[in-house]
Amino acid sequence: MIELRNIQKSFDGRTVIDGTSAIMKTGQCNLIIGASGSGKTVLMKCMVGLFEPDKGEILYDGKNFTAMNNKEKTEIRKEIGMLFQGSALFDSMTVQRNIMFPLNMFTDWTYQKKLNRVNEVLERVNLKDSNKKFPSELSGGMKKRVGIARAIVLNPKYLFCDEPNSGLDPQTSLVIDQLIKEITLEYNITTVVNTHDMNSVMEIGNYILYMHKGRKEWEGTNKEIIFSKNKLLNDFIFASEFLKDAKEMRMLEETGKMPNDRNIDDIIK
Amino acid sequence: MKLFTEIGRYLLMLKGMFSKPENMKMYWKELMHQCSEIGFGSLGIVAIISLFIGAVSTIQTAYQLVTPLIPLSTIAQIVRDTVILEFAPTLVCIVLAGVVGSKIASELGNMRVSEQIDALEIMGINTKAYLVMPKIFASLIMIPLLVVISMVLGIIGGRYAGSAAHILSVSTFDKGLMYGFIPYNVFFALAKAYTFSFIISSIPAYFGYYVKGGALEIGQSSTRAVVVSCIMILFSDYVLSALLL
């Protein structure tokens, strides 16, 4: 479980995160959503220790990460896996060496044992037989999957995914979402996903934290989001007419009545 | 004010390099990789430059020595001392600032922009120690060796150029080469080589490590790294000459 307590972060006097608190539970996908510039990436970078929050506390299973010294933080970081927006694979290394890198650095396993583990995680992300390929030879979706494989190779307790669907087609996005969801349940890890992909929100959002101008505007589940009356959230999530209609259809399914006194025929039309 | 901030950040980067390695074997591998990249990767250009510098020095020295009162073997003495004292350490290091410096800055810059450095940090790796330190140590090992090779090749270039241009025979050159040799000059050249090696590796590493932006900024920081390194080489060349000669 990861707990955020009143996180604040400013850059050159400009407040980017303004007192955000949240509890992200183990074994579920915790989503941070918000418009560009709402502070979600900065919040995630504070959580993994790439930025130091100005105020507030971040607790990993009760351990105060913000109060730790560098050595203690390094120990926590060994339990963190992260998938970056651009995958952040090492260009000069093959897929196999990319995934083996954390094993080489932090284990004293034999080469064969490391290779077996690499093959195991590659198979898990459906990339069997891609060991010898270089990142430049992979598609966007494959790079993301290699990124996930590298992130989970050391059996992390916490998985962070920064915009895992950016630059991917809707079908590949679904595959990545499913993969993240399955891995979260399979490894029983705390997964934090930073996204503004609405499919992800509806598909895997066990817990959703909506950020607006650096503040927590709304929190809840993907079920609750449908019924939310928060205007900012609704404007953000259901921005297009199509999505508004989809929301109303979903509400009709769930409650048996139409919101805003609309008629089902209007939507179908 | 910005200059002091940059100097402070540069010093903090150097301080941050010193921590217990996460895995000594991986650090050793990286050091060997960098030695190969910096040393063998630059050997060709250093050899070509050195041979031609020696050759040109011989011809131009002979051109300026118009009086028959000075023995021809003096040309070899002048070429030897010029190559050892200045050409091999300073000129070669300025060229290496371009070759090695821009490579270090763009490599680290690209890793920063594509979040590879962040990825390493999140794995719990001290990126200053793993990425910067092996480059600096490899430079400190390989660049003085390149400078010594450059000294030898420069003198060889001068020796054969003199003979080929019928300025002085190989035996006359050899005679002058061994006359009045001061071993301290080699020590001085090596002192310069070590200083310049540190400049060539640490300054571009700083510019690359802290780059912000995209491809354009990587190019800009690479250029700035080379320019600042060259200026620092020339400045420290002056300081070392004033102090040690």
Image (cartoon, rainbow, N blue to C red):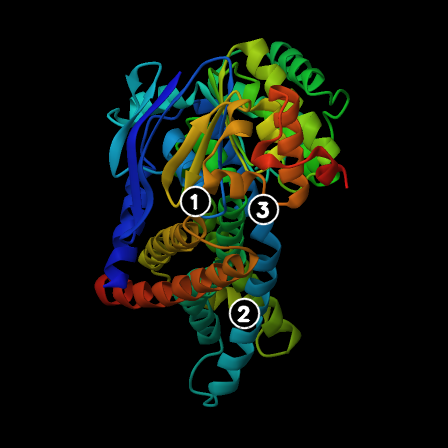
Q: Residue furthest bottom?
A: B67
Q: Is residue B35 left or right of residue A18?
A: right
> Which residue is tagged 1?
A38
Q: Chain of mark 2?
A: B
Q: Residue at x 56, y 78 (%)?
A: B59
Labels 3, 2: front one: 3
| Amino acid type at mark 3 | Phe
Q: Residue at x 43, y 49 (%)?
A: B205
Question: Marks 2 and 1: in contact by CB < 8 Å?
Answer: no
For marks 3 and 2, the one nearer the N-term is 3
A29 vs B242, left or right, is right
Query: Mark 1, residues whose alpha carbon is within 10 Å: few (<14), some, or many (≥20)?
Result: some
Q: Which numbered disc covers residue A26?
A: none
Residue lying at 39% horizontally and 39% vertically, measured from the top left: B128
Q: In the image, B15: left or right of B82?
A: left
Q: Chain of mark 3?
A: B
> Mark 2 belongs to which amino acid?
Ile
Circle 1: element type: loop
Q: List the residue tagged with mark 3.
A: B40
A70 sits to left or right of A116: left
Q: Quadrant of the N terminus of chain B?
A: bottom left
The one of B130 and B67 positioned closer to us in this rendering: B130
The vertical placement of B195 against A95, above or below, is: below
**Dot 3: element:** helix
What is the number of callouts on the image? 3
**Figure quadrant of residue B225:** bottom left
